[in-house]
Image (cartoon, rainbow, N blue to C red):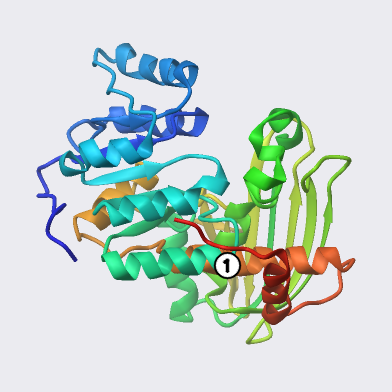
Amino acid sequence: MSSKNSVLPQSPLRIAIIGCGGMARHHTVAMLRHQELVQIPVVCEPSAETYARFAVLFKDVGLTPPPNEPNLTLLLREHADALDAVFIITPHVLHHEQAGACMEAGLDVLLEKPMVMNTVEARSLIEIRNRTRRRLVVAFNGSLSPQIRTAVTLLRSGELGAILNIHGVVWQSWNSHTQNTWRQAPEIAGGGFLFDTGAHLLNTVADLAGEPVIEVAAWLDNRGRAVDILGAVMARLASGVLITLSGCGDTIESCASDVRVFCTNGILRTGVWGERLEVQRAGDADLTPVEVPASHGAWEQFMHVCRGEIENPSPPEVGLRMAILWDMIRASAQQGGAPVTQHDAEQLVMREGAVAKI
């Protein structure tokens, strides 16, 4: 690993925000509460109106807003030497090109989910990460949460016995909130609810499973939109573990999830964002909360990774894993729910002519 961006424990991590929309504002509010840990010297936002809304967050806490360089190429050329990393929070179709350019410029990258649009782009980012030797962390709340990391440790330890079934569901009033936005434009978003909010469901369940999905049967319902709004998935792991997943993006005003792992010696309950962790062992009357360390969110875990304090809990291999599962879901749904393998999904991507551009 290059020493260019090594950060001493007492030095704030210098992160450029790429994309200043609603999710960026959500993350930045938390980051500004911990200025001793992280600083934002510059941002990249092509919309003057969006940047103005973003700048208010700094004014509200008595800080001068960081300058905005709308062109990422110019930002990297003029500011890379004064940065340690970037946090990319842009439409999905831009992720591959932007993350690749930032790693090529010598910066570590925290990349919003889903990592990329398909498996071709996922493998390309892994190649760039390997060649540049930069850190690439995918901002999956679940994989970066103490709850999911603790859940994985419990499951791998054998304390709860063998995994038998995994069931996950996520729901949100997504359709009404995303109409007339890029999130319902398939060429930009890459999918609908199950690829956007549902990406957390796919990733967290795969993380808990800890082994490849070998067969998928799936159905997607667009409800008259250009992208999927509802989804139902059945899957089988190499070991025989059975998985059921459900996504509903057109329900009442809400955003929540539930994930259950049924084992021979216990039941584990969590959420797709790691919003809880509960366990019920044989003989227990009900689920009991499991205590885990506190966390300020994905950016804090990224900071620990950049400092070499922890191993990367959400590397690009995690993004590839989710991309493979999503491509399998799409392949099955296009065949009316017929079971498909990873090979079938790869054939779909090849027919679509997916390429990775830098």
Q: Is residue 58 above or below residue 297?
A: above
Judged left or right of residue 314, residue 206 is: right
Nearest the viewer among 267 and 70 is: 70
Residue appearing at x 59%, y 56% in the figure:
117
Task: Residue 211: give x, y in percent of width and height.
Answer: 55, 79
Question: Is residue 334 rendered to the left or right of residue 276?
Answer: right
Circle 1 packing at 10 Å, graded few (<14), some (14-19), many (20+), is many
Q: Residue at x 23, y 30 (%)?
A: 41
Which corner quadrant of the image does residue 45 belong to? Answer: top left
Q: Which of the 4 quarters of the picture holds residue 342?
A: bottom right
Q: Give left or right: position of 177 versus 99.
A: right
Residue at 34% over, 46% down: 294
* Quarter of the picture holding the C terminus: bottom left
As drawn, 332 above or below 23: below
Q: Which residue is mark 1?
A: 119
Query: 346 or 57: nearer the eye?
Result: 346
Q: Position of residue 33 (x, y in %)?
A: 29, 28
Classify 291 as above or below 34. Answer: below
State the image quarter where residue 203 is shown: bottom right
Q: Is residue 218 above or below residue 296?
A: below
Going by the numbered disc 1, the residue's amino acid type is: Thr
